[in-house]
């Protein structure tokens, strides 16, 4: 896949949206029937017919996907909702997850939001929205593989970006940890997501952004201390609860 880059101004998608690696994996795992159909249409006298048939299939898929402005625009639009997904998952962890994952006062809340949960929800939404695209739906299994990989790469770029925009007018990512071993969706690390409690509050109002940042700094230290105090059995139980959280 091409370059997915997140900045404070949003997401930018550059280059081809589908690359040969994606297609090669699909052809080897699920695309052999299509290769066989291509093979029957080649002259029997051609040498290396199976290789040529496979190459024709790869070229066909790459041309269809990377030549479709409709698919590209739809993918960009869907991937751009990631900040909303991060906030959605954080609020779900806060309302339905283990108490060790958040701290609140009357005005502010900080949630420790594992990346694996974000990726699971983000991939599900992206695949559900675009898997029936007319460009790719004939290649059974490829849309889900391609779209999940696209969402995963997008999340990796967003997580690494230090200058994110606010998630909305009342919330922001105040920090990250890329090392904590959650092993959810085969992914470690988490976001620290802070938000103002009242819908009447707004980060653009004088003093509220500063109050949220100061609270988040103190609350983050407390959450870290709490996690460090858990033994391995407690951590395993925490992971199990999070892995079954409805998103």
Image: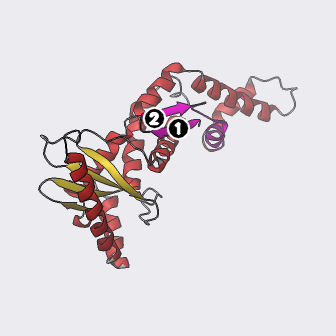
Task: Choose top left, top right, bottom left or bottom right for residue 227.
Answer: bottom left
Q: Is residue 138 left or right of residue 39?
A: left
Q: Which mark is residue 57?
A: none
Does the rendering let one see residue 132? no
Task: Choose top left, top right, bottom left or bottom right for residue 80.
Answer: top left
Q: Which mark is residue 11?
A: 2
x%, y% of residue 61? 62, 28
| 10 in the magenta segment | yes
SS of the residue under disc 1: strand
Q: Is residue 109 above or below residue 161?
A: below
Residues at circles 2 and 1 in contact by the CB criterion of under 8 Å: yes
**Which part of the image, by quadrant, shows the N terminus?**
top right
Q: Is residue 205 above or below residue 44?
A: below
Q: Residues within 10 Å of mark 1 (few under 14, many from 20)?
A: many
- How many numbered discs, if any? 2
x%, y% of residue 63? 64, 24
Does the rendering let one see residue 166? yes
**Which residue carries the number 1 mark?**
4
| 24 in the magenta segment | yes
Q: Is residue 73 left or right of residue 84?
A: right
- Looking at the picture, tell me which residue is in the foreground, 183 or 104: 104
| Mark-to-mark CA distance, 2 and 1 | 7 Å
Q: Along the polypeptide, which appears first: circle 2 or circle 1? A: 1
- What residue is drawn where x is 15% and y is 49%? 197
- What residue is drawn where x is 46% and y is 47%? 161
x%, y% of residue 132? 44, 28
Q: Is residue 93 left or right of residue 146?
A: left
- Looking at the picture, tell me which residue is in the foreground, 98 or 144: 98
Task: Choose top left, top right, bottom left or bottom right for residue 200.
Answer: top left
Write the start and end of the magenta stretch as one range: 2-28
């Amino acid at each position: 896949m091409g370059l997915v880059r997140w900045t404070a101004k949003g997401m930018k998608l550059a280059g081809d949206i589908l690359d040969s690696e994606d297609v090669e994996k699909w052809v080897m795992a699920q695309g052999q029937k299509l290769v066989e159909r291509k093979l029957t249409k080649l002259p029997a006298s051609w040498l290396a017919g199976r290789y040529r048939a496979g190459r024709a299939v790869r070229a066909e898929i790459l041309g269809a996907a990377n030549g479709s402005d409709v698919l590209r625009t739809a993918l960009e639009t869907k991937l751009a909702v990631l900040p909303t997904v991060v906030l959605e998952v954080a609020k779900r962890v806060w309302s339905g997850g283990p108490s060790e994952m958040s701290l609140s006062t009357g005005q502010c809340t900080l949630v420790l939001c594992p990346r694996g949960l974000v990726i699971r929800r983000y991939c599900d939404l992206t695949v559900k929205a675009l898997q029936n695209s007319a460009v790719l739906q004939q290649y059974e299994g490829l849309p889900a593989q391609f779209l999940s990989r696209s969402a995963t790469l997008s999340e990796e770029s967003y997580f690494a970006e230090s200058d994110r925009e606010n998630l909305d007018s009342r919330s922001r990512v105040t920090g990250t940890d890329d090392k904590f071993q959650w092993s959810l969706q085969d992914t470690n690390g988490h976001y620290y997501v802070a938000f103002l409690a009242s819908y009447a509050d707004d980060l653009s109002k004088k003093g509220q952004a500063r109050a949220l940042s100061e609270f988040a700094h103190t609350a983050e230290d407390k959450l870290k201390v709490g996690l460090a105090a858990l033994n391995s059995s407690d951590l395993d139980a925490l992971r199990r609860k999070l892995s079954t959280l409805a998103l």
